[in-house]
Image (cartoon, rainbow, N blue to C red):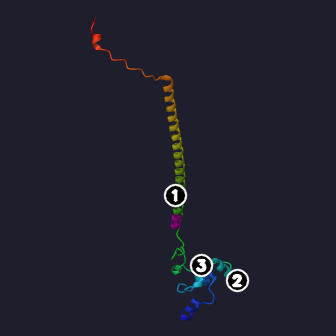
Amino acid sequence: MDMDEILRSIYSSEPKAADQVWKDMVEGKDTNNIITTQHEQHMTLEDFLTNKATAAADGHQEQHGTIVVPPSSSSGTRRRGKRKGHVEEPLLDKATLQKQKRMIKNRESAARSRERKQAYTVELESLVVQLEEENKRLLREEADKNKQRLKQLMEFLIPVTEKRKPRGMLRRVNSVQW
């Protein structure tokens, strides 16, 4: 690439569509050194779709059929977003695929187990609240019954009357015989 091609790729009159970038990748052109313009960096989905629609109306429709996948040398391409440096996964062997499936199943099983545990905890907490309320109610009933029982005992069974203490007797009088 000479300087003119770099400048043309940076300051092109029209931003490249996703189809053109994909074709460049399939053809093996080096897209790592091309710096995108400010307009391309802030393109929204709506803008992209309108560009795509106008390109389709002009007769630049993409060909349908088999998709040519570029060689796996795309490790240098950078993607915008949270996962910087994320590379498309290469074809994995059978053992790795089984390991990944097992990991996914384990995660799903653990999630179900956590849900069951949480549901059980919520059930136990509601049962505790119910039992505490019942305990308070029973304690109030017991206190009321004890008050009523004491009231009945005071009214009917034990008549409360104060008697005077008998006067003290002289012991000598009783000890002497007449």
Q: Judge left or right: residue 108 versus residue 162.
A: right
Q: Position of residue 62 (x, y in %)?
A: 68, 81
As measured in the structure, the alpha-carbon distance from the residue carrying label 2 to the one carrying label 3 is 26 Å
Can you tell which of label 2 and label 3 is closer to the viewer?
A: 2
On screen, 137 above or below 168?
below
Can I make out residue 62 in this image?
no
Please tell me which residue is depicted at 51% across the width and 81% down the height of the picture: 76
Can you tell which of label 3 and label 1 is closer to the viewer?
A: 1
Please tell me which residue is depicted at 54% across the width and 44% down the height of the picture: 130
Tell me the kind of residue under disc 3. Answer: Val
Tell me the kind of residue under disc 2. Answer: Thr
Q: Which mark is residue 54?
A: 2
Circle 2 SS class = helix
Tell me the kind of residue under disc 1. Answer: Ala
Is tag 2's residue or tag 1's residue first in the polypeptide sequence?
2
Can you tell which of label 2 and label 1 is closer to the viewer?
A: 2
Circle 1 SS class = helix
Label 3 sits on residue? 69
